[in-house]
Image: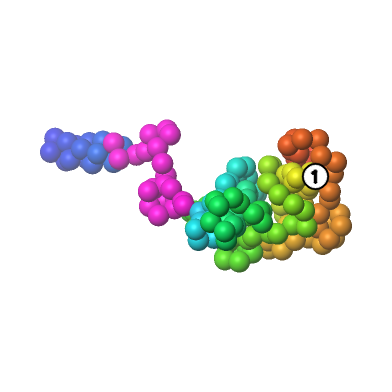
C-alpha cells in the first residue's frame, strides 16, 4: 500500500511541477512557444500598437505599414493601416479580411493608427494623418463599413496626435 501511495504522490507532484507559473508564455498560443509573429507585407516595416480582445476571445491589433521609396533613399511613403485578427490559439482568423489580416489605404495622407475598440461586432480604429484625425469602422468580416460616416470614415480636426476611442454601454462613441 505504501508503494501505491508513493507512486500516486510522485505522479501528482510531477504534474504540478509541469504547470505554468503566472507570467509564463502559453505554449498553446502561436507556434507552441506562446509567441505569434505578425507579418503583413514582405520587406516593409510595420508597427502595431493597440490590442483588443473581442467577446469571442479573438485578438485584434492595428498599426501601419509603409512602402519604401523606389529611389533607395530609405524614406517611407504611402502609409497604410493594417489590422490582424487572431483566434484564441494565435492562428490567423481566416474569416477576417484576407486570411486574418487586412491592409487599408485610407483617403488621407500619412495615416497612423493610434487606438482601437469594439462597437458590438464592429471594429473602430482611430488615428491621425498629416492634416486631420480620423475614425473608421470595419465590419466583423474586416470589410470597411460604408454605412459609417462618409464611406466608412469620419475625418476630424487635427488636435495633434490625440485621437483615442471609447464607447459607452449603449455603443456610442
Whether 124 is drawn above or below 9: the answer is below
Question: Closest to the observer: 133 or 72?
Answer: 72
Is 124 on the left-hand or right-hand side of 22? right
Report if residue 166 lies within the magenta region: no
Describe residue 27's horizontal placement relative to residue 96 as left or right: left
Provide residue 158's location: percent of width, then percent of height: 81, 39
Quarter placement of the N terminus: top left
Q: Is residue 48 visible?
A: yes
Q: Residue at x 70, y 59 (%)?
A: 105
- Residue depicted at 85% across the width and 41% down the height: 157
The residue under label 1 is: 131
Task: Residue at 61%, 51% (x, y): give it.
Answer: 76
Where residue 6 appears, as percent x and y from the top left, is: 17, 36
Q: Tell me the chief SS of the magenta region.
A: loop
Under tag 1, what secondary structure?
A: loop
Q: Nearer the viewer, residue 23 or 81?
A: 81
Q: Position of residue 161 (x, y in %)?
A: 73, 37
Q: Answer few, some or many: residues within 10 Å of disc 1's Cα (few below 14, many 20 plus, some between 14 and 19).
A: some
Left or right of 28 in this view: 39:
right
The answer to whether residue 159 is above or below residue 134 is above
- Magenta region: 17-37
Residue at screen point 75% across, 46% down: 129
From the viewer's side, name the closer residue of 134 and 130. Answer: 130
Residue 21 position in % (x across, y down): 38, 34
Q: How is the image coloured?
A: rainbow
Amino acid at each position: 500500500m505504501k508503494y501505491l501511495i508513493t507512486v500516486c504522490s510522485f505522479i501528482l507532484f510531477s504534474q504540478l511541477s509541469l504547470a505554468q507559473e503566472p507570467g509564463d508564455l502559453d505554449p498553446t498560443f502561436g507556434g507552441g512557444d506562446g509567441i505569434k509573429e505578425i507579418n503583413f507585407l514582405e520587406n516593409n516595416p510595420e508597427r502595431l500598437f493597440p490590442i483588443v480582445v473581442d467577446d469571442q476571445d479573438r485578438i485584434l491589433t492595428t498599426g501601419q505599414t509603409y512602402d519604401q521609396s523606389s529611389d533607395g533613399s530609405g524614406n517611407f511613403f504611402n502609409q497604410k493601416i493594417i489590422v490582424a485578427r487572431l483566434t484564441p490559439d494565435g492562428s490567423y482568423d481566416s474569416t477576417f479580411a484576407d486570411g486574418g489580416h487586412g491592409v487599408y489605404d485610407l483617403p488621407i495622407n500619412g495615416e497612423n493608427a493610434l487606438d482601437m475598440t469594439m462597437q458590438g461586432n464592429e471594429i473602430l480604429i482611430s488615428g491621425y494623418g498629416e492634416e486631420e484625425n480620423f475614425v473608421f469602422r470595419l465590419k466583423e468580416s474586416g470589410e470597411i463599413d460604408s454605412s459609417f460616416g462618409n464611406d466608412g470614415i469620419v475625418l476630424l480636426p487635427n488636435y495633434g496626435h490625440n485621437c483615442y476611442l471609447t464607447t459607452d454601454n449603449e455603443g456610442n462613441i
